[in-house]
Amino acid sequence: MTLIEVEGLRKRFRTRRGPVEAVAGIDFQVEAGEFVGYAGPNGAGKSTTVKMMSGILLPSGGRVEVCGMVPYRERKRLARRMGVVFGQRTQLWWDLPLEESFELVGHLYRIPAAERAARLRRLEEVLALGPLLAVPVRSLSLGQRMRAELAAAVLPSPEVLFLDEPTIGLDVEAKAAVRDFLRELNRDEGTTVILTTHDLDDITRLCSRLMIIDHGRLIYDGTVEALRSAYGTTRVLVVDLAEDEPVQLAGAVQARAEGRRRWLEFARDEVSAAELIARLLAGHEVADLTLEEPDIEDIVRRIYRGEAPP
Amino acid sequence: MAEHTRVYLRLAAASVRSTARRPAYLAARTVAAALIVAIEVAGVVLMLDRFGSIGGWRPPEVLLLFGLAFTAQGLALVFGDTLEADKMSELVRRGTFDQVLTRPASPLGWVVASYVDTRFLGRMLAGAATVVWAADRAGVAWTPGRAALAALAVACAAAIIFGVLLAAAGFTFVTVQGSEAVNVLIFGGQYLASYPMQIYGSPLRFMFVWVVPIGLAIYVPALGVLGRQGPPGLPGWLAWLAAPVAGAFVALGGLAWRAGIRHYVGTGS
């Protein structure tokens, strides 16, 4: 089932320096149950797209439909079926104990009391919120607060969840807690998640699909693996030689040398790692070796810079 | 409908509880707001003392007008305080309003109910006390009709002030992302104004928050309460006209607010 349909979507802003096309005609569809990462440099049009999908902004052109509704036209009805978490702002009641926020959300989204209690018990357990319920939101740490924000956003069992930088500023442990929760939510409840982030780690760990936007256009839409194989054709063999000697190998270029360590770059589609290692071992005594896959961070940076796939 | 109302009442209650988490702060704000009314009343008393009367109105009669106006302002600002330009533009600039738009609620209901300011309850109560005191000094014999007139005056003046605030808030959506210069010209004075001036900062606000509502909704009913003859051409039944006028103000304010939201959704922040 298609949950989000975007077709020729545009948004033009008028600024003092003339009109700016923040979103310049993008098309995509998201099926129910997908976990989509939405990346792009600052000002690429990420949040403008999300705002159009959540009904905060009216498109200047094209079509957007979420859960079968036109967001800006059926804002309130759609609001009942979607959850929104903006990493740097709170959806909770700042001065009140956390449990009151959950209670208000329950009333706001008309969740029957028994259902709310049951769901809350589960969320409290998964997100370890129990000890925090009586604490005013403003006294929570950032990691605690983000867990609470997620609980509040998914309490009404939304079909689609829009997340904007949910792990920003979190420490390693808090990041892991947030990611685990999202992964389980997507897997167990089938919640569709659109994750806007700068943190590519979030994307590689969570998303089945990655969309990259730049200058208001969708420049990549596919899996992380496909991106790696399309752009990341250069792999690196790191070799620790038994003796300090020059290395010459057909199909590989020495990128760096440090003591007895050599970095040998080679193209995935020209020579396999196994073949290269065999050639290496035939002529040299090797103490150790590792194979480095292209870094997704690196690949995306190259895409932002406008480098076409080789 | 009843369910809707309950949600907004819950939001309002949450907003009051938020302030009540700091009881001393809440009490200080409320008492301070009431004290300011007392100071303003004292100012009027002192001024009237010099002149004896204004246009044939004795001091307690003038005070009754002021008392009704204070009560109405307090009532309007308990709910409408966030609609003031500086507070609205803050909501917009901080992105809070974007979040309001993602809630299954009316944005106006949300904004009004979520930012109830109990400080103005102090103003309202002090205003009501002024009315009672001034009426006593002016020798008003309260009848159900006169009490109804006073209540009508307060309700209508409050509605008019609320309507004006609503329209101003609608306008804020346009100015926030417009040139900042416009903002400074129209609203800039507020940032500099100290507290008492906040109530009637610029001449424009003075005009709308004092002159228009008092002229329309307070002066004429007050004549009835005091049992005074108005100037010729101002018949007593005119007082009841205040209700439709107030309704029109709220309706126009509502239209401006909706236009503002449409603009906001169209252009973003």
Image (spheres, rainbow, N blue to C red):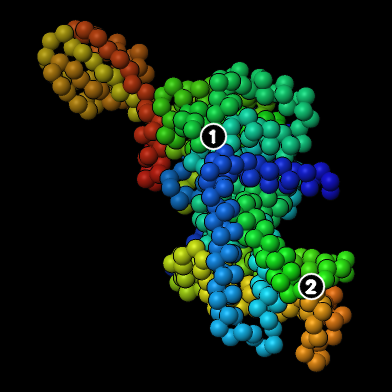
Amino acid at pointer 1: Val
Image height of A203 relative to A63, above or below: above
Q: Quadrant of residue A198?
A: top left
Q: Is residue B267 visible?
A: no
Task: Label 2, secondary structure: give it.
Answer: loop
Left or right placement of residue B193 versus residue B100 in this view: left
Kindly identify the residue that appears in the image at 71 percent across and 72 percent down: B137
Q: Residues within 10 Å of mark 2 (few under 14, many from 20)?
A: some
Taking depth in this image into account, of A237 and B153 the one nearest to the observer is B153
Taking depth in this image into account, of A135 and B259 the one nearest to the observer is A135
Q: Point out residue A93 in the picture as x, y percentages from the top left corner.
A: 59, 39
- Residue topped by disc 2: B140
Kindly identify the residue that appears in the image at 67 percent across and 68 percent down: B67
> Is the same chain shared between marks 2 and 1?
no
Image height of B174 relative to A161, above or below: below
Left or right placement of residue B156 versus residue A242 in this view: right
Left or right placement of residue B198 versus residue B223 in this view: left
Amino acid at pointer 2: Val
Q: Point out residue A129 in the picture as x, y percentages from the top left corner.
A: 57, 23
Name the mark on residue B132. none
Kindly identify the residue that appears in the image at 15 percent across and 15 percent down: A260
- Residue topped by disc 1: A137
Q: Point out residue A189 in the picture as x, y percentages from the top left corner.
A: 68, 24
